Amino acid sequence: MSDEKKHVVPYRVYVIVLIALVILTLLSIGITGIELGKYTVAGALIFAIVKSFLVLTWFMHLKYDKLYIKLMVGFVFAILVVTIVVTFLDYLYR
Amino acid sequence: MQSTNVANQPNYLEYRGKYKGLLGWIFSTDHKRIGLLYLYSMLIMFSIGALLGLAMKFELLAPGKTIMDAQLYNATFTVHGVIMIFMIVIPGLPAVFGNLLLPIMIGAKDVAFPKLNLLSWWFYVAGVFLVLSALIFGQGMPDTGWTFYAPYSFKTGTNMLPAIFGAFVLGFSSILTGLNFLVTIHRLRCPGLKWTKLPLFVWTLYGTAWIQLLATPVVGITLVLVAMERMFGVGVFDPALGGDPVLYQHLFWIYSHPAVYVMILPAMGAISEIIPTFSQKHIFGYKAIIASTMAIAFVGYLVWGHHMFTAGMSGTAQYYFSLLTFIVAIPSAIKVFNWISTMYKGSINLQTPFYWAVSFIFVFMIGGLSGLVLGALATNIYVHDTAFVVAHFHYIVFGGTGFAFFAAMHYWFPKIFGRMYDTAWANTGWLVFFIGFLTLYSPMFYLGMMGMPRRYYDYLEEFHGGNILSTFGSWILATGLIIIITNLVRSARNGPKAEANPWHGKTLEWTVPSPPPLENFDEIPEIGEHDGPYNYK
Amino acid sequence: MENSSHTVVHDHYDAEASKIGMWLFIFTELLLFGMLFVIYSVYRFMNPEAFHLAAEELDTFIGAVNTIILLVSSMTIAMSTTAIQKGNKRFTLLLLVITVILGIVFLVNKYFEWKVKFDHGIFPGSEMLTQTLSQGEILFFGLYFIMTGLHALHIVIGIVFIAVVMQKVAKRKIHAQRSALLDNAGLYWHLVDIIWIFLFPLFYLLT
């Protein structure tokens, strides 16, 4: 069963994404150097989430994929988040 | 749906390919042969697990030591649990009936990744051998219970590592099967077979496959961590080093609760096939059953803490898990209403599969309702870790998955083996088994409420009568099992030849010869606009 | 039924099926590592100061270098999927070689990082760890070794996977019309990158 005509991503798209990723990495190092108290963890996580989103969307081709694959990926991350939240219902309120 | 002319294909049982004899089976990538490989392996492991169960019941015939001491009893219930859970009821219906029937039911020649399918079975066998090796070598049989709770699981001197790695490898088998079925259902449905025309058994295999895929890695990493604790003492679950044993329980049950939906969803799917066929009537509420299947699969991820109400979680967590547990019961109840409604004003055909299906509904309801007793916080305190829990899960799992497995076996037997079994013996076996089942497990509800703990080889004299009745029930059940299995094994070899559609079913597997030809179809079927899996007149 | 000379020959190349299969496998890895992150979050929540303290023992510079290395290697393997579509076999192989080399450099860095720790007596179950450090620190290092170790194992598997793909590209078994295996190797490698994207801040940056 053959696929539809494949979308060929230009090289420069990947280079641009890499530059963005490196910048975000350097920024995250900088941000966590500052004393932000309990927001440090949130800040670091936000950078990690944005970087992962870039990798998923462009490097992993999700941007050009069919909807159901994107839904599946979103669903799995949702399950992970829900699991952490529910686990913390225990630890937060002990 | 047209039937196919397959005179030029051998049937899958007789086909001889590159490999001869036994090798032609253990190297076969034919989904039907792989399904039978699972069936035969499970038959062996089930017999071992059942013997262990009988041994436990014999020990409990009288207080104090009857035939074994405490240590041996602990090992017996541990191995009984590991075998039954990881080798029988979790793979159970998907590995046997999913493999045998899924491709045919969707009009495909095989699964998406046939070689991966064979690898799944080899992993299964490897896992079995690893677990069995734990019994033979080393410092003694595992004695932690199948739940491997920390810290005992990394402190006990018994042979935990092979058992843990065995369970890990068995998990791999489960994951790969789930992966294979998901891609198969997404990509290999025949032309015209829309999602809304899929048989309900296929829908349940789909939901189950997602759970197998997403939940099993959780127990995988948890078992690896226990192994790390045993070997290196990292501290993740060791209170002496700052670890929290309750966290182990969270991780363990994040898998093991969804796992019970792996056990029950395909069982419900099989029942959803059998009831319409033997009522010769369209299933009532097809879309409601699909919705409830997916709801069970999803909500089932959110209730794991109900195994841990007395472990030391926060009050908030307890309330939350109890609430979600009651919610998840609703979709299951919906299915029971749908099945009963299907039978209403149907043209009932009283055959063996139907007896199994109806008795399934009966025992499943009892098991499910007892789950509500366990799901309510106030009552849970009294019955947690008592015989009540043992009764509950045997009703739900043995009663649910077990009865459905036998129902499916008797339903699809003519298709799989091309022969019919002796109906009188089959019905006798069913009746003896059913009576034995009720006698074995019903007393446990009472004993548990009266306070008899589980996993103890000894008990107070006041529990003696109930235990005698229960053990007696185990012998009746075993007799029933022997009748059933003997009948099936003999009939598979020498039974009268079966036709393509003895039960007048409407799903695709009944359009091909019994047994199916090697590639299932001569031509891939095409489903018309007005065709459907339950379109009875 | 005669046992005929019926042979079964199938060549159903379904790129989309392979892609779904690879994504499904990736989901299992996300859950696997995800649970380790759950454990990390719980113990961090219970031992905030100890985790801060222990994180200072790790070398942020090496961690950052390793992060950049993996990001670049993700780019190179992503570019290789374009190269194969353009029929550029040599460039494809060059990009894959660079990816592998970067992966190896990552592992070498990891080796030296761990060696430093081991030389200071910090390894799972060590006396120094269990007797002198606080419970939070013990948990931090336990998780550090397990998570970076499991991650490194996945890098090794990824390198082997890419090596196999390179061999098939060289023999033209993977080409523009049949690129699924290369695309999927890329997906796997990006997964390994994403895991490190989370490991880096959680272990190195939260001091």
Image (cartoon, rainbow, N blue to C red):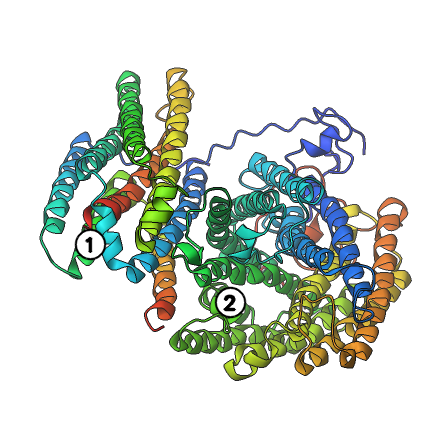
Residue B504 in sight = no
Q: Is residue B436 left or right of residue B374?
A: right
Decide which of A64, B300 is in the foreground and name it.
Answer: B300
Rendered image: mark on residue B296: 2
Residue B51 percent location from the top left of the image: 79, 55
Q: Residue at x 36, y 56 (%)?
A: C38
Going by the numbered disc 2, the residue's amino acid type is Ile
Q: Is residue C93 left or right of residue B459?
A: left
Rendered image: mark on residue B455: none
Q: State if disc 2 and disc 1 touch (CB < 8 Å).
A: no
- Mark 2 falls on what kind of element? helix
The residue that label 1 is drawn on is A46
Decide which of C123, C149 is in the foreground and name it.
Answer: C123
Decide which of B416, B161 is in the foreground and name it.
Answer: B161
What chain is tagged by disc 2?
B
Vertical position of residue C93 compared to residue B290: above or below: above
- Mark 1 falls on what kind of element? helix
Quarter occupied by residue C157: top left
Going by the numbered disc 1, the residue's amino acid type is Ile
Residue B66 percent location from the top left of the image: 83, 64
What chain is tagged by disc 1?
A
Vertical position of residue B462 compared to residue B389: above or below: below
